[in-house]
Every structure is written in C-alpha cells, then in structure tokens.
Image (cartoon, coloured by chain):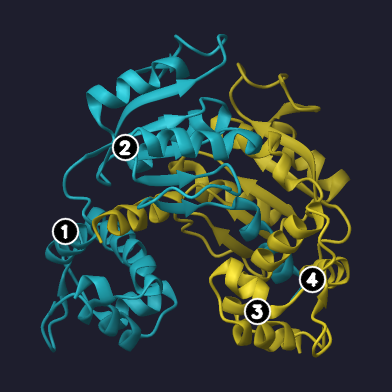
Chain colours: A yellow, B cyan
C-alpha cells in the first residue's frame, strides 16, 4: 500500500507527528480528527483520509490515542530507530543543521561532518569534530551512511552529490540549490528556503 | 482577483520564478508550460491554470517569454523592490540566513540583526553589525521594518513575536517553532525543516 500513497499525503504526516508531539508534551492523551484539523488548518475528513492510506487508526466516537498515533506515524515514516547521517559543508547553515536539537528524537543521528576549509576542519560542532572532505571516502566505506545533508556552496553541489552517490549515499537533504546530476536510485529533498520568503511577501500584500 | 487565489497556487509561484531564473541564467529566452512542467514534475495544464489565476501570459503555440514571465511573477509576488527585513537571533541559523546570497535579488534587503548575547553583539555578519536586542524598539520606530526572521531558541519565540508585532512588524519568517500568541493582522511562514527530513526518511524506504 505504501508505494501508492501520494507525496502530498506523505508530506502531511510530519505535520501530524509534530502536532501530536506538542499535545503529548502538554499532557494531552487523546485527540480527534476534528480537533487536529482545527489546530492545523485542515479538514477532519482530510486527516481521516490521509491516515486511512496507511491503516485503521482511532475509534469512531473516541478519536485517537495520542501516544499510539505518534508511534504509528513514526513507524510509517521509518523514524523509529536513529538513522545515521552525515553533513557536507560546515559553514553557518551546515553548522546550524548539525547543532539542531529539532533533529534529535526524530529518527536521525549525526555521525560525521565534513568540510574542505582548513580553518573549520578539526573544530567541534556539538559533540562532532569536523573532518576534512578527503576523509569522506574512507569514512563512508567504514560507516556506510545512507543519508547526507548538502550544505555546500551552489557551485559545488553537483560534484558533491555525485561523489556521495558513488560512495553509497541514497538520500539527500539538499540545501545547496539545483543538482545537475543523475544519481541513480537516490532520493532528494531539495530545500529552497527563499521560496517561503517569497510566499510571505505575497501574503503581506493581500 | 489576488484575494481569491489559493495558498497552494501561491506556493508554486516561487518555484516557477526560480526555474525561470535558471533558464534566464542559461541564456534561454523562451519556454512552454510543457517544458516547464517536465522539468518541475508538474503537468502543463497545472502550470497554465496557476498562471491564469493572475492574468494572461504567454501565447498559444509560442509559449512564454522567459524574462517577461519572471517580471510578471516578481510583480505578483511583490518582490520587485527590495523590502527591508530584520533578523532576530544571530546564532548559526540566523547567521546563515543573514549571510545568504539566495535572498539577494529576491526582493529582500537585510537592515538589522539583533541578539541578546554580548559575545555576538557588535560582530559583523556580511556588512551588517549585530545589535543588542535592547536597541530593537528604537530601531523599529526609526526604520519601520515590516518583516522579521525569527531565529531564536524555541522558548523565546512567542515573546519575540509579541514584541515585534507591537513594534509594527507584520510578517514573520519563523524558524523558531510554535508561536503561542495572537499577533493581530500578522502573517507567519512557519518553517519546520525537520518535516522534510522525515519525508526523506519515508521516501528512502519506498
């Protein structure tokens, strides 16, 4: 069933997960598609439909058990166990991502940071020492990370993606702009932060 | 007409803008909804429909003039003239945003960076000196920025938003998590970077 679910539905799951985590942190143990919808700006039927793509959750008239639904969504998203990832580029953005508390407890574990700037190599970000990019190949052979964050200058992104793909990386969280390479079997989440800033500009004028 | 366009359509405009800019940079002067759709993973009719919400662009059988369409979308998004914005929080993420080249030429102009950490205040990010947050009120009275980036710790986000709203800020690009405040008339773009990382996790398993 998983294979058939549209990406638009998949993209809403992390929102549900995040909201349910907020409820859990506030000590709230049950919720309903109506309550969730109101808080999140979605309709109740949208939420029910989305969750129905993955199975049967909640009970008519009772709603959802918050902590159970969190576990179910974590299972669907495959974030139950910490998945090792590496960060390429230890500039400000790469550093911010490496140091982010938001990624902890979301199924991801930072195992390596790489840069080619000798002023940065050797420094610590959180508990992780920045390594020289020349160590990347050996590191990947030993640790076999499947996921990488690309936080390099735009001009270096394509080469970095090709290299990482050849070293077994299959998933890219890409903050470095357009990648002009075919990396067979790899999946990309391309983040274009400025897009939402442009949306904000539009909404200001409305 | 603007007021009636759905946010889903508005959110695609920056993608079109970004892609058209790539074409322009590559020296390509015309495109079609079919070519654009293929490159962007959308259908041609989706693109035509989206653009039709705002007016009539392009010519049947010829397609779109790239530079004209860029100008039209910039006008729709209200990013033709540089709009001043401030950044609250000069940690790694705030620093990365302040230093980003991607925001230049997208209708935004950084006019101030504020932090409460005396180790950071006084330092330069790009050409902008980080000011103490105590200077914020006077700065806002003088410069009247309407847009702010929130890059503060989660626990400080609500207070920061309330303060900024009271000082006339109307649009928030929020990287600091959930804002638990009613800021009348303000618009928020809440960025949850970890959402896309969770989506990536799902897609790896497919």
Give the position of the N terminus of chain A as an image quadrant.
bottom right
| A62 to the left or right of B42 | right
The residue under label 2 is B168
Task: Using the image, name the chain to which the residue with label 1 belongs.
Answer: B
Q: Which residue is under mark 1?
A: B75
Q: Nearer the viewer, mark 1 or mark 2?
A: 2
**Image marks 2 and 3: residues in contact by CB distance under 8 Å:** no
Picture quarter containing residue B148?
A: top left
- Residue A79 visible, this orientation: yes
Q: Which residue is mark 4?
A: A73
* Spatial CA span between label 3 and label 1: 38 Å
Q: Earlier in the sequence, mark 3 or mark 4?
A: 3
Query: Label 2: few (<14), some or many (≥20) within 10 Å?
Result: some
Residue A127 screen position, x and y as percent: 81, 27
Are the residues under marks 3 and 1 on the same chain?
no
Image height of A65 relative to A136, above or below: below
Left or right, A57 with reference to A7:
right
Q: Is residue B184 above or below residue A138?
A: below
Q: Position of residue B29 (x, y in %)?
A: 16, 65
Q: Residue at x 66, y 72 (%)?
A: A36
Q: Are marks 1 and 2 on the same chain?
A: yes
Q: Residues within 10 Å of mark 1 (few under 14, many from 20)?
A: few
- Horizontal and vertical percent position of residue B40: 41, 72
Q: Position of residue A122 (x, y in %)?
A: 73, 19
């Amino acid at each position: 069933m998983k294979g058939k679910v549209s990406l638009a539905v998949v993209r809403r799951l992390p929102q549900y997960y995040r909201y349910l985590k907020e409820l859990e942190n506030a000590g709230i143990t049950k919720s309903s598609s109506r309550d969730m919808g109101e808080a999140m700006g979605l309709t109740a039927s949208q939420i029910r439909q989305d969750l129905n793509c993955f199975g049967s959750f909640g009970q008519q008239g009772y709603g959802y058990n918050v902590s159970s639904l969190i576990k179910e969504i974590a299972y669907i998203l495959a974030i139950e166990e910490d998945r090792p990832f590496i960060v390429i580029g230890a500039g400000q953005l790469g550093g911010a991502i490496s140091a982010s508390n938001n990624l902890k407890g979301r199924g991801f574990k930072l195992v390596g940071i790489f840069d080619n700037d000798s002023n940065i190599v050797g420094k610590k970000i959180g508990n992780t020492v920045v390594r020289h990019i020349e160590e990347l190949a050996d590191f990947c052979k030993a640790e076999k990370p499947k996921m990488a964050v690309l936080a390099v200058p735009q001009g270096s992104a394509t080469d970095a993606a090709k290299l990482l793909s050849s070293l077994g990386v299959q998933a890219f969280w890409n903050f470095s702009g357009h990648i002009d390479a075919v990396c067979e079997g790899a999946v990309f989440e391309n983040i274009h932060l400025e897009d939402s800033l442009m949306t904000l500009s539009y909404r200001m004028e409305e």
